[in-house]
């Protein structure tokens, strides 16, 4: 890990001795009750950032004043699209110049994962409030550094897991804390999302002239891209499946369900024991991360199990498997029943005879039978359709409300929660990356006595067989069993795993050791 570096150019004339001194003038005014608009910039918007632009463009009391993207073609197109809506957004390719401009009060980050923590920390150090997409980090150490920076400079920092603003989920999780179905037995998160092959190239690919590849690579090694997806091209999106930049579908889609699953467990730290099993199976391509995976975070109270599947229900179809009615969701099993949360904002509670007990919101695709125990009107969740876009607006609005009030306690998705939930993805990936291939019998022996892990293993084997994958031939990787001290966020007696808690940062894109 690199040592602490000099302050960036945008810090030269900024007093950071205290949080009050670091407040931009317009945000200070907002904190004192002014009605001034919050000036915001979206950083990275070829994909997910479009939702940020849409939310802020239509939000009262907010002015979208700048866009930042390392791809000049994306940047130019974004500025022109806003001009058609009579919104003048200044273009920036380099986030450092954006932060140095003094023209924004807050930034909203939707870059690739490997930039999330560094961009957020730089923003915080420059006196900005920050909305940062999931996962909030590319590795555990930098996520903790982001938490430290947030605390030190007292900025408003929201993580982009929108389910944190969904009333239905909050209501069901709150009710389950009263143990109406007895104690929690386990939670199983699901990310069954179709991921086709990204193709196989014979050599390094030429970066498009419109992209500043040094900036795009940022903290990661400056190496030529080695992928060329027919749909996404050489650079965009498929970075999710390359370890230098992404965290696989566990850290892409799965982080949403990981966070929801952790809320059911009530755990506020990384798990003490971790093991994962998986592989990239069903095709040979340039991707590195597993498309088939299950993992166990062995908390003392109840295990958190997670499953990733990128292959379809069976070869030749596009539909995905379901587990208790959900493909992308969370199932929490209790002594006398279970909860299914099949999306970001809805949930249904069943007894162990599969009889509906309560329904929160309008959960799609689940049993719709007469409720035996209707929710009192005083407890009812909103009856919206649960669409992602509907509740996202409230999540972005919650961030802006807290920017104005300066009350970080009112944030729905605090950065410490983003760090823990992201970290659970990272530690499971570390287990996988340190693992070795194993036969089915070796896997069964490893999980002997662990009913839920064996269930995940056998269902995964059946799923792979339906996709013409024989795990006797194309063996799964048995991840290394890891023990962690959740207080220090270091592994116990495992230097190789500890090394993977961070990365070698490439100057000048270095996450500072002292924020």
Image: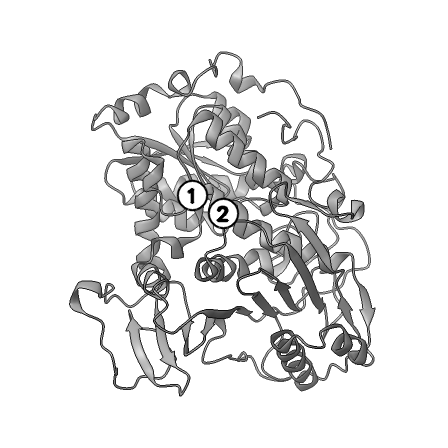
Q: Position of residue 362 (x, y in %)?
A: 30, 72
Task: State the residue position of label 1.
Answer: 414
The answer to whether 316 appears left or right of 253 in the picture is right
The answer to whether 55 appears left or right of 110 in the picture is left
Q: CA distance from mark 2 to mark 1?
A: 7 Å
Residue closest to the eye, 107 or 450: 450
Task: State the residue position of label 2.
Answer: 418
In the image, what residue occupies the spot 75% across and 49% down? 497
Q: Position of residue 290 (x, y in %)?
A: 69, 64
Kind of element beneath mark 1 = loop
Residue 30 has which mark? none
Q: Are marks 2 and 1 in contact (CB under 8 Å)?
A: yes
In the image, what residue occupies the spot 66% across and 67% down? 291
Residue 242 visible in the current orientation: no
Q: Position of residue 458 (x, y in %)?
A: 67, 82
Residue closest to the eye, 16 or 297: 297
**Quadrant location of the N terminus?**
top right
Residue 263 visible in the current orientation: yes
**Quadrant location of the C terminus?**
top right
Q: Position of residue 236 (x, y in %)?
A: 60, 52
Residue found at the far left of this picture = 377
Residue closest to the eye, 473 or 152: 152
Residue 454 vertical placement versus 166 (above, below): below
In the image, what residue occupies the spot 45% across and 47% down? 49
């Amino acid at each position: 890990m690199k040592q602490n570096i000099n302050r960036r150019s945008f810090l030269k004339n900024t007093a950071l001795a205290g949080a009050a001194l670091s407040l931009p003038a317009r945000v200070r005014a907002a904190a004192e009750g002014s009605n001034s608009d919050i000036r915001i910039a979206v950083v990275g918007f070829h994909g997910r950032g479009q939702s940020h632009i849409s939310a802020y463009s239509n939000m009262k009391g907010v002015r979208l004043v700048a866009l930042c993207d390392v791809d000049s073609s994306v940047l130019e197109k974004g500025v022109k699209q806003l001009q058609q809506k009579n919104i003048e957004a200044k273009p920036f390719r380099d986030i450092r110049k954006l932060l140095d401009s003094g023209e924004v009060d807050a930034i909203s980050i939707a870059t690739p994962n490997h930039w999330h923590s560094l961009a957020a920390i730089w923003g915080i150090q420059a006196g900005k409030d920050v909305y940062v997409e999931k996962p909030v980090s590319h590795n555990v150490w930098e996520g903790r550094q982001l938490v430290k920076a947030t605390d030190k400079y007292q900025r408003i920092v929201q993580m982009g897991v929108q389910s944190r603003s969904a009333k239905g989920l909050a209501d069901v999780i709150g009710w389950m804390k009263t143990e109406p179905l007895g104690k929690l037995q386990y939670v199983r998160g699901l990310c069954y999302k179709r991921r086709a092959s990204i193709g196989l190239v014979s050599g390094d690919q030429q970066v498009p002239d419109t992209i500043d590849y040094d900036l795009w690579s940022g903290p990661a090694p400056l190496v030529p891209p080695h992928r060329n997806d027919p749909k996404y091209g050489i650079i965009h999106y498929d970075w999710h499946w390359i370890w230098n930049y992404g965290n696989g579908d566990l850290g892409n889609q799965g982080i949403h369900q990981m966070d929801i699953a952790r809320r059911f467990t009530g755990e506020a730290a990384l798990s003490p024991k971790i093991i994962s099993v998986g592989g990239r199976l069903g095709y040979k391509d340039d991707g590195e991360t597993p498309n088939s995976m299950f993992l166990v975070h062995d908390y003392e109270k109840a295990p958190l199990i997670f499953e990733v599947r990128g292959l379809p229900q069976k070869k030749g179809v596009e539909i995905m498997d379901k587990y208790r009615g959900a493909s992308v969701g969370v199932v929490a099993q209790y002594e006398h029943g279970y909860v299914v949360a099949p999306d970001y904002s809805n949930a249904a509670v069943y007894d162990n005879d599969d009889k509906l007990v309560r329904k929160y919101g309008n959960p799609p695709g689940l049993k719709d039978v007469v409720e035996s125990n209707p929710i009192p009107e005083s407890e009812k969740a909103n009856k919206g359709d649960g669409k992602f876009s509907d509740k996202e607006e409230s999540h972005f609005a919650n961030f802006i409300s807290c920017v104005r009030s300066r009350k970080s306690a009112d944030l729905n998705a605090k950065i410490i929660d983003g760090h823990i939930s992201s970290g659970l993805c990272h530690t499971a990936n570390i287990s996988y990356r340190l693992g070795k291939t194993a036969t089915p019998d070796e896997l069964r022996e490893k999980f002997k006595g662990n009913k839920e892990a064996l269930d995940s293993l056998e269902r995964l084997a059946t799923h792979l067989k339906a996709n013409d994958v024989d795990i006797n031939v194309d063996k799964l990787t048995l991840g290394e069993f890891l023990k962690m001290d959740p207080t220090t966020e270091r592994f116990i007696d495992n230097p190789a795993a500890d090394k993977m808690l961070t990365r070698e940062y490439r100057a000048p894109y270095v996450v500072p050791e002292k924020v």
